[in-house]
């Protein structure tokens, strides 16, 4: 038995990308997964207990990566196992370079580089990023990550080089 070779496909140490939370505890400004997409809740309304016995929560949320509006209705007393809450992280990196193929090179806190992030799709953010980089300014970008996806969501200039 000890001579068997084990092969593991996953490298995430078993960490889940989501966690369950009761629908009645999710508030405006929080996060929820709707139709498999991580979303920020912009509106929550709760209906009273009806003849079928459960109060319902109606969620209106915006996809944090595509900005699409999504809606969902779930019983407020049920855990959102079907629509769990995503782990959302926001990390700041310093911009090093913008490549010709549409990727950016970023400096992490530990001094290594991150080269797998595409330029933002938001035109305003893209224009600010390119203009600041061309002017030689030090730029710090904020990257939002959730459920295996990440995207640049904001930037700030920290002064000239």
Image: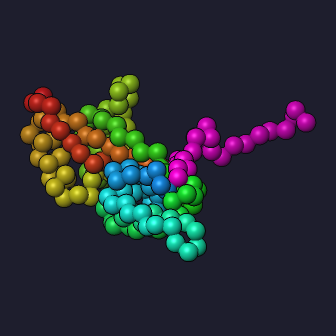
Position of 127 with respect to 6 (left or right) is: left
> According to the image, what is the colour scheme of the structure?
rainbow
Q: Nearer the viewer, residue 123 or 27?
A: 27
The residue at 52%/72% (across/down) is 50
Q: How many marks?
A: 0
When asked about the image quadrant of residue 133, the answer is: top left
- Please determine whether, in this image, residue 154 is positioned above or below residue 23: above
With respect to residue 122, does 16 lie above or below?
Answer: above
Residue at (38% x, 24% y) in the render:
110
- Magenta highlight on residue 9: yes
* Furthest-bottom residue in this view: 51
Q: Is residue 63 left or right of residue 23?
A: left
Q: Tell me the quadrant of the picture where the N terminus can be found.
A: top right
Q: Is residue 160 visible?
A: yes
Q: Is 61 covered by the magenta stretch?
A: no
Where does the image place residue 47, in percent across and percent down from the top left? 43, 67
Which residue is at the front of the view, 122 or 90? 90
Nearest the eye: 54 or 128: 54
The answer to which quarter of the image holds residue 51 is: bottom right
Q: Which residues are magenta?
A: 1-22
Q: Quadrant of the C terminus?
A: top left
Q: Residue at x 42, y 45 (%)?
A: 88
Residue at left 80%, top 39%?
A: 5
Residue 6 spot, x, y in % from top left: 77, 40
Q: Where is residue 40? Give x, y as percent.
A: 36, 55
Q: Determine if residue 96 is in view.
A: no
Magenta stretch, overall SS: loop
- Report x, y in % for residue 33: 47, 58
**Residue furthest out toward the top:** 110
The answer to whether residue 83 is above or below residue 1 is below
Q: Nearer the viewer, residue 33 or 90?
A: 33
């Amino acid at each position: 038995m000890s001579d068997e070779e084990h092969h593991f496909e996953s490298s995430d140490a078993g960490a889940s990308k989501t966690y369950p939370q009761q629908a009645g505890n999710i508030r405006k400004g929080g996060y929820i997964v709707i139709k498999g997409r991580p979303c920020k809740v912009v509106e929550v309304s709760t209906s009273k207990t009806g003849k079928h016995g459960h109060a319902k929560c109606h969620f209106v949320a915006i996809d944090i990566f595509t900005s699409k509006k999504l809606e969902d209705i779930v019983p407020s007393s049920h855990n959102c196992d079907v629509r769990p809450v995503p782990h959302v992280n926001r990390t700041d990196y310093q911009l090093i370079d913008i490549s010709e193929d549409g990727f950016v090179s970023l400096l992490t806190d530990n001094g290594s580089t991150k080269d797998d992030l595409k330029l933002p799709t938001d035109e305003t953010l893209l224009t600010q990023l390119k203009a600041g980089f061309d002017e030689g300014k030090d730029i710090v970008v904020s990257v939002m990550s959730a459920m295996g996806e990440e995207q640049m969501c904001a930037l700030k200039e920290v002064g000239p080089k």
